[in-house]
Amino acid sequence: MKIGTTVILPQTDGAREPIRIALTGAKGGYGRTFLAQLARTPDIVPAVLVDPDIAGVRTMMAELGADRPLRECAGADELAHAVDAGETALVAGLDAIDWTRVDVLVEACGRVPFGAAYARAALESGTHVVMVSKEVDTVAGPELDALAAERGLRYLPGDGDQPANLIRLREWVDAVGLEIVALGKSGEYDLVFDPATGSVTQAGESIDAPDLAALLDLGEDLAETLARRAEAVRGLKRSAAADPCEMTVVAMRTGTAADVEQMRYPVARIDELADIYALRADGGILESRDVVDVFSALRLPGEASFAGGVFAIVRTGDPVTWELLRGKGHVVSRDGRYACIYWPYHLMGVETPLTVRAAMAGAPAPAARADVLLAARATEDLPAGTTFAVAGHHHEIAGVAPAMIPPRDGVSAYYLLDGARTTRPVARGELIRFADVEGVDALSLELHRAGLARTADDRTE
């Protein structure tokens, strides 16, 4: 069966050979959720696990109760023997992989120089790629996607992370025939307001926010309510580089764009989304349609979470139809012109077997195009010699903020800056340009520029 263009195949009955996957970043959180799920999907086997921490991978696999033998391999020949013997090969890096023993690469290392190299090597060797590393996708996705197409392979964002789920939701909405106004997701952590204490908690951090008690309803002045809510939770960090990174992956495949370069991040309750993400002329916050955005989900203790899920805002049609749907609990704007369709979950690697099967089945997917750039804007004056490094849970770079903009000549991609160093002072507010830095990873830069060139050529044809 299909949902959008994602093919959901049944597990094999044992008559077919299992799908052999290589997983990079195997010891990461995403890797663990995926490997745990493979115990329940016998049609997919972890043939190769790639991570510098091989001992840590062994420990994790033992915790998961994996019964497939593990063998550490120093080279491609050893790996081939291990996989042929029905073992899982553990390797520390690219050079030890024999791609002829791998059907699908699941790239989840999260680091652009390494992920780009893994993905290109896989495609050049005839191996499909499921891309979980959204950072890699924003830099090199258009070119890697094109390389896959040229070779009759699949390059797909992985189900279970918000970009793939949102693209799939978009396909479903398009197939139904509804008109998209906006696409988006909630931030990773809800804002949980406790009226009894007047505090709001996000990811274990609490602040006093008694003003929220009077702001739980939108009221007549939507803009004022949203501004007052934002002020009430000002002490919490509600945005992260991961958000525009994920929305860039979506924009590259759906033809959408950010309404403003760092998105709007309204503090919103789920049943308000159709009112908030209406066009400004209809009382909402959007200047145009076909946009991507992120909101901070506001809820009370005990209410269901949005769970970092995804949503689509659509125009309604027949008012009787949508009033009927409102009565069934669907989210429809107060004026009846807009509705919100949402999936309140993203289950990480638990869902990724869907994409592995889709890759092997040759399922179609929207092409990635370099029509949007995740750039880097300086948030402070940066002296010459400033070294950039991706760090932390959300893979952020100190001193710069991500900005979703149309591609501009000479402007660097945000995640190309990992490990680069400024060669001249850059003033606060400036976009970082290639001319400002040195030490950019050569392969990633090559793939990035090739993707930009392909997209530009497509526009002129």
Image (cartoon, helix red, strand yellow):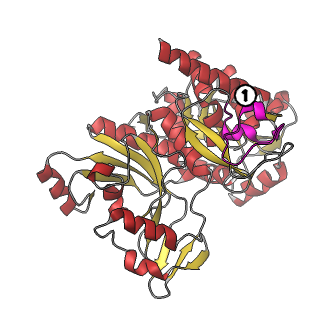
- Residue lying farthest top? 461
Towards the viewer: 195 or 460 = 460
Residue 133 locus on image (x, y percent):
64, 42
Residue 39 locus on image (x, y percent):
60, 50
Residue 169 appears in the rendering:
yes
Callout 1: helix, strand or loop? helix
- Residue, x 53% and y 45% (percent of image)? 261
Residue 47 appears in the rendering:
no
Is the residue 317 above or below the residue 36 in the image?
above
- Residue, x 73% and y 56% (percent of image)? 392
How many numbered marks does the figure carry?
Answer: 1
Residue identified by numbered label 1: 445
> Which quadrant does the N terminus fall into?
top left
Amino acid tagged 1: Leu
Image: magenta residue range: 411-436
Towards the viewer: 160 or 186 = 186
Residue 253 locus on image (x, y percent):
48, 33
Among the 4 quarters of the image, the one containing residue 225 = bottom left
* Crowding at mark 1 (Cα within 10 Å: few <14, some 14-19, many 20+): some
Residue 434, magenta (yes or no): yes
- Residue lying farthest left? 320
Q: Is residue 160 left or right of residue 215?
A: right
Is the residue 307 above or below the residue 22 in the image?
below
